Amino acid sequence: MKNTKEDVRTPAIGYLLAQVCRLVGSRRRAKLEGIGLRHAQGLILFRLWQEDGISQRVLARALHITPPTASNTLQRMERDGWIERCRDATDQRIVRVFLTVKSKKLREEAHASFKELDNEMTSMMTRQEQETLRQSLLKVRGYLIQAGDEDTGHACPGRFSLPDEAEKIR
């Protein structure tokens, strides 16, 4: 394969995705801080808004973090009144995580904040371009998950690892 000037100047898709992911992550962090949340707290709350009362282990797996990391973050969130943790009634080994009134009240504001970010990111695109991008990203994500890369996606710091959150924000 020839190495032309055009080839050198045309960034690889993976490189572009990594750059976009980093930039979006930075903006998402700023939006979360604007409503009083740290990045990890926001991701945890978004997952719990999808399914309140899931186990701590399932939550850690969904966010691609280790159980000890999840435990430390959840401990701080519990101290600050964002969540409550309770042992499962039928299996005491399982710790379930529940939203508090405080975190439930924040849901609409957080969703509006991310919808605003989504609109900002796609404002220069036509509806067709937005749908093409969405379908392409879903296809790539599906392939990577099927290929077994679901738990190794840390190349994109702060990535939004909640499966269908983009569809819910739309």
Image (spheres, grey):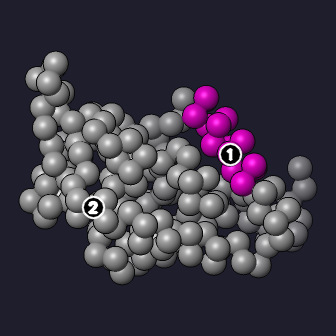
In this picture, which residue range is highlighted in magenta?
Answer: 134-147
User: Is residue 138 a member of the stretch shown in magenta?
Assistant: yes
Left or right placement of residue 56 versus residue 76 in this view: right
User: In the rendered image, which quarter is residue 73 located in?
Assistant: bottom left
The 10 Å Cα crowd at callout 1, few under 14, some 14 to 19, many 20 or more, is some
Q: What kind of residue is marked 1?
A: Leu
Residue, x 48% and y 57% (percent of image)?
A: 159
Q: Which residue is mark 2?
A: 103
Q: Nearer the viewer, residue 84 or 38?
A: 84
Residue, x 25% and y 51% (percent of image)?
A: 99
User: Is residue 136 a member of the stretch shown in magenta?
Assistant: yes
User: In the rendered image, which quarter is residue 66 located in?
Assistant: top left
The 10 Å Cα crowd at callout 2, few under 14, some 14 to 19, many 20 or more, is some
Sequence-first disc among 2 and 1? 2
Mark closer to the observer (2, 1): 2
Q: In this view, which residue lies farthest toward the top?
A: 90
Task: Check residue 125 in the rendering and tell me which mark sits there, or answer none.
Answer: none
Left or right placement of residue 139 versus residue 126 in this view: left
**Above or below, comparing residue 154 to residue 6 in the picture:** above
Q: What kind of residue is marked 2?
A: Ser
Task: Check residue 138 in the rendering and tell me which mark sits there, or answer none.
Answer: 1
Q: From this viewpoint, is residue 130 visible?
A: yes
